[in-house]
Amino acid sequence: MPVRGRAPANFAPAPGALTVVGCLGRQLLDDDFLSDPYPAYRRLRESAPVAWSEEFFGGAWLVSRHADVDMVLRDARFSAQRTGGWVMRGSEPRTELRGFQRLFARALIFLDAPDHARVRQVMASAFRPADLQRLVPRLTQAIADRLDAADPLAGFDFVSTLARPLPAQAIATLMGVDDEAVPGGFLEGSDELASFLGAIEPTREQALRAQTALLKMAARFETALQPRRQSLDKPGRDDVLDRLVRAERDGQIRGSAELLAQCVMLLFAGHETTRHLLANGLQILLRDPTAWRSLAEDRALLPAAVRELLRFDSPVQYTGRRVTTEMTLHGQTLRRGDLVVALIGSANRDPAQHERPDEFDISRRPAPSLAFGQGPHVCLGASLTLLEAQLVFSQLLDRWPQLELAGSSAAQRMGSPLYRGPLELLVRKPSATP
Ligand code: HEM
């Protein structure tokens, strides 16, 4: 999940404060960092656990140790409201982005108590275990259909075949929107949104493109919601959109903008993240033939393997908070209004929490990771994600236990420090195998 914010107007580095550039001797966000951020995270954890970086959102504190990331995510002194920076750049307002900010600021992930608890209670009803269980046959069939259409001997791109479309299909089904019935689909424009949210300093053009996409998605939802408002008490249907509309009627969701914000965010959060777990996960597993063989022999290892994938190369590398009360952390003064980037990807490689953190080991006794966040905003879609990943890897192992990577091992990756995943992943089955 993304962070956004304005540079803290009140920031003045404390005498002797470590800045990222000062501490690491170079800019953090170069190509090496995008392909492998872990050495830089290690240096941060060891020598500047709270470091000021001008590179993130015009200025933010980077927090890199497990204990500190955990604290930032749980502690109410760190606010989740951080969308103001989309409209304000320093003292300069970007008024043309107000529509965007007005809508997205109401999304669950950017709310604080008490509004957060009120909306979260409604949203949590989307992920009841019984609803997820009902999804299993449809997901299993959808995976089978997509793999049937692939040609493993010629090789195929796992991202476009499965990793990208499946999570979108899963969340659309759960929400009760049939993406294919809508011209352009609900997800049209989702790439623009992802590249905006995944950029640390988005350009005005990126922001405007993302706003257009977001408002278009919202308009599609508005059209889908109208008939439901009129037929709410009709028996037979009880999907997520119905539950949201009922909550709007009962006053638990306040107004149409709040309702639309949840719809758009859920759809986006439901597919942009899981796709990276699937694609990145398969790449890591196929690079580790021992792990892949172990899974082929014993499916009971899969749940722990998926959790290890989430820890080892977290699909969401960071999230953000805004400081509400001045405090000192590792000698640095964090002032009210400052933006904090909680580096989940770094916390999950912290040796203070995980033994041999840089080893991918599906048999490790896992210590809880922060891949799904922590505290009040902990991911609502975690069970759905784990379900999807297990169904996908399980079918791949059943069909093609000899699957291997095809093409360059340096697959082109998302050019974003926020999301970890390849844009394309070519895989194939060697011709001599069953
Ligand atoms: C690999 C898959 C996923 C990862 C790594 C992931 C990660 C995260 C993280 C780190 C947060 C916390 C953000 C914060 O504290 O600022 C979060 C929150 C959230 N996630 Fe996920 N997520 C995944 C999949 C999903 C899916 C499939 C859905 C929905 C279908 C979803 C819906 C949400 C929602 C609604 C929140 C906000 C919860 C709140 O603010 O109370 N996520 N996710």
Image: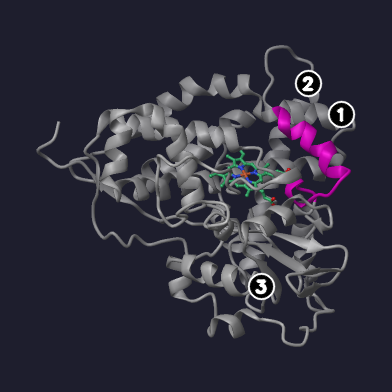
Task: Return the disc, 3 or 2, that comes first in the chain's sequence.
Answer: 3
Q: Which mark is residue 204?
A: 3
Q: Horizontal and vertical percent for residue 113?
A: 86, 46
Residue type, label 2: Leu
- The quadrant holding residue 14 is bottom right
Q: Amino acid at mark 1?
A: Arg
What residue range appears in magenta? Answer: 106-125
Q: In terms of sequence position, does the residue under pointer 1 or pointer 2 come before the other? A: 2
What is the x, y in percent for residue 160?
A: 39, 46
Q: Which residue is mark 1?
A: 249
Question: Residue 232: which disc?
Answer: 2
Instruction: Mark 1 and mark 2 in contact? Answer it, CB < 8 Å.
Output: yes
* Residue that lies at the very extreme toward the top in this rendered image: 235
| Front residue of this view, candidates 68 and 247 | 68
Answer with left or right where residue 229 lies relative to residue 210.
right
Q: Secondary structure at mark 3?
A: helix
At x 34%, y 45%, the residue is 285
Q: Is residue 178 visible?
A: no
Is 117 a magenta residue? yes
Q: Main secondary structure of the magenta part?
A: helix
- Going from the N terminus, do you reach mark 3 or mark 1 first? 3
Q: Which mark is residue 376?
A: none
Mark 1: secondary structure: helix
Q: Badge 3 local density, few (<14 within 10 Å), some, or many (20+)? A: some
Quarter of the image for the C terminus: give it.
top left
